[in-house]
């Protein structure tokens, strides 16, 4: 992301530069639910349990991602490093292992 919060893509030929997206779980089978079943699931289960489910998902992913980032040598980067869940208002600062308000990372 650049300072205007836009995704940055690298279009050069240097294989040591990473930019873009990578499938990290390729062996997952996706199922298409019948639309009525999906609506019922969302209305009855997910919305009733949303705060708990979201917090558990966020905690699990944050721990896993942070471990992978450290194992891959991310700590040696001199630039600030963050990850954020899509459309969230906070970012996880990987070097300090803490959540910050999204606006703080642009200061």
Image: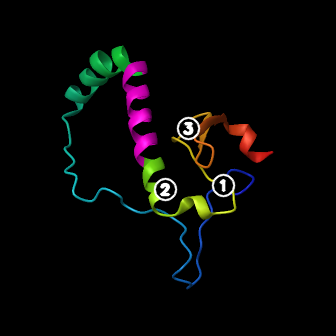
Task: Report the residue marked by disc 2.
Answer: 69
| Residue displayed at 44% across by 50% down | 67
Query: Looking at the image, which is closer to me, 89 or 30?
Result: 89
Q: Position of residue 57 (x, y in %)?
A: 38, 33
Q: Is residue 33 above or below residue 20?
A: above
Task: Report the residue marked by disc 1.
Answer: 6
Q: Is residue 29 left or right of residue 21?
A: left
Query: Looking at the image, which is closer to me, 56 or 5?
Result: 56
Determine the CA span between mark 2 and mark 3: 22 Å
| Residue displayed at 58% across by 77% down | 11
Q: Is residue 63 magenta?
A: yes
Determine the CA span between mark 1 and mark 2: 22 Å
Main secondary structure type of the part rendered in magenta: helix
Colouring convention used in this rendered image of the protein: rainbow
* Res. 61 image quadrant: top left
Helix, strand or loop at disc 1?
A: loop
Give the number of the mark in front: 1 or 2: 2
Lower sequence index among marks 2 and 3: 2
Task: Verify CB contact (< 8 Å) between mark 2 and mark 3.
Answer: no
Task: Report the residue marked by disc 3.
Answer: 87
Q: Position of residue 49 (x, y in %)?
A: 35, 17
Q: Position of residue 15 (x, y in %)?
A: 51, 82
Residue interval drawn in magenta: 51-64
The quadrant of the image that shows the C terminus is top right
**What count of labels does the image hold?**
3
Lower sequence index among marks 1 and 2: 1
């Amino acid at each position: 992301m650049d300072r205007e919060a836009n995704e940055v893509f690298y279009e050069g030929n240097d294989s040591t530069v990473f930019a873009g997206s990578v499938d990290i779980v390729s062996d997952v089978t996706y199922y298409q639910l019948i639309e009525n079943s999906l609506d019922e699931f969302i209305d009855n289960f997910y919305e009733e349990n949303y705060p708990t489910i979201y917090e558990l998902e966020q905690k699990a992913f944050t721990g896993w991602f942070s471990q992978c980032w450290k194992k891959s040598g991310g700590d040696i980067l001199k630039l600030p490093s963050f990850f954020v869940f899509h459309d969230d208002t906070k970012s996880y600062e990987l070097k300090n292992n803490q959540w910050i308000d999204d606006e703080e990372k642009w200061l």
